[in-house]
Amino acid sequence: MTIQTAAITGCEPLIQLHEILLRAPGIYGARFSGAGFRGCCLAFVEADRADEAASFVREEYRKVQPKLARQISKGKEVLICEAGDCARVI
């Protein structure tokens, strides 16, 4: 699968994270989120490859941002979430 991206603006650590996500196994796409609050990246990934993708992202990010990666709480570097049932009236 070929993923095309538009020009990205942002700080170097987030741009690097975004680039790593796009290379990770099982990733369909990624984007920035939370601008102004230190930010983060979100990615959609094949459910059965989520752990593999998370390991890849952890390892690759430590290579490009070792000092910053050490500041992230252990176990909080990558959060894997599942989609809910969708929006509905409760």
Image (cartoon, rainbow, N blue to C red):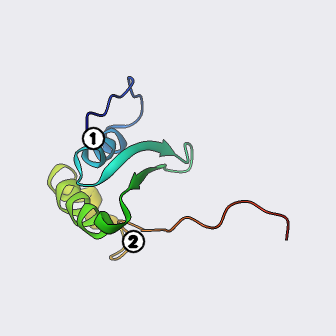
Say which residue appears at 47% left-offset and 42% top-offset.
Answer: 32
Nearest-to-viewer mark from 2 and 1: 1
Q: How many marks?
A: 2
Between residues 10 and 52, which one lies in front from this camera angle? 52
The residue located at (42%, 34%) in the rendering is: 10
Residue behind mark 2: 76
Q: CA distance from mark 2 to mark 1?
A: 19 Å
Q: Residues within 10 Å of mark 1 (few under 14, many from 20)?
A: some
- Outermost residue toward the top in this view: 7
Q: x, y (%) of residue 20?
A: 25, 47
Quadrant of the frame with the N terminus = top left
Of labels 2 and 1, earlier in sequence is: 1
Residue lying at the far bottom in this picture: please name it.
75
Picture quadrant where residue 55 is located: bottom left
Residue 78 horizontal side relative to residue 66, left or right:
right
Residue lying farthest to the left in this orientation: 63
* Residue 45 in the image, given as x and y percentages of width and height: 37, 56
- The residue depicted at 29 percent of the width and 70 percent of the height is 51
Q: Is residue 80 above or below residue 62?
A: below
Quadrant containing the C terminus is: bottom right
**Residue 82: percent from the left, percent from the top?**
50, 68
Q: Which mark is residue 19?
A: 1
Q: Residues within 10 Å of mark 2 (few under 14, many from 20)?
A: few
Amino acid type of the residue tagged 2 in the rendering = Lys
